[in-house]
Image (cartoon, rainbow, N blue to C red):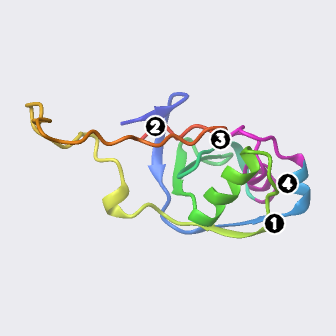
Amino acid sequence: MKTIKGLPIVNATLPIYLVITSEDIANGIRKDPTSCAAAVAFKRQHRVTEILMHRSRAYIKYDYMDAWVRGAVPKSLSNEQIVFDRGGDFQPGTYVFSPLLESKRPKGKRQGGNTEPSTEGKTKRVRRVLEGVRSEAGFD
């Protein structure tokens, strides 16, 4: 089982509602998953002691739990985070963090065979990396 700071990661079972205000945005720090505008709002509205707010996943440590709760970051908030990290304006609003779909949850094993696939005759796909934004979560 994956852990963060020695505590297990559990999946959220219910949606989590978050209202981000202008004050949260003013107090947020760009490119910081622990102190961005959404993290500031979580700490203000919920009983959260620590949070890791990445582009697609949020890891939330509530003060009454001995585990981290993993939730899916809504696409609209992910887009706002990218704009904010690059120096643009973050728009206040209400966001809903959904539990991860069963198909999106980590299974513990990587899929695939033991052999390397043939790359003969195939065009190499160029992977686009977003520059100037926070890192993607590495806990899944």
The type of residue carrying mark 2 is Phe
Q: What residue is drawn where x is 51% and y is 40%?
A: 129
Circle on res. 139 = 2
The type of residue carrying mark 3 is Val
Work out whether 6 lies above or below 61.
above
Q: What residue is drawn where x is 79% and y is 58%?
A: 90
Highlighted range, magenta: 27-45
* Foreground disc of the pair 2, 3: 3
Circle on res. 133 = 3
The kind of secondary structure element at disc 2 is loop
Q: CA distance from mark 3 to mark 4?
A: 16 Å
Work out whether 122 lies above or below 45.
above
The type of residue carrying mark 1 is Pro
Q: Which numbered disc flags the more N-terminal residue, 2 or 4?
A: 4
Q: Nearer the viewer, residue 82 or 63?
A: 82
Q: CA distance from mark 2 to mark 4?
A: 26 Å
What residue sits right under mark 1 in the picture? Answer: 92
Q: Position of residue 109 (x, y in %)?
A: 24, 39
The kind of secondary structure element at disc 3 is loop
The kind of secondary structure element at disc 1 is loop
* Magenta-drawn stretch contains 115: no
Q: Which numbered disc flags the more N-terminal residue, 1 or 4?
A: 4
Q: CA distance from mark 2 to mark 3?
A: 18 Å
* Foreground disc of the pair 1, 3: 3
- State which quadrant residue 114 falls in: top left
* Within-10-Å neighbours for mark 4: few <14, some 14–19, many 20+: many
* Magenta-drawn stretch contains 35: yes
Label 3–label 4 contact, CB within 8 A: no
What residue sits right under mark 4 in the picture? Answer: 25
Q: Which numbered disc flags the more N-terminal residue, 3 or 4?
A: 4
Q: Quadrant of the N terminus?
A: top left
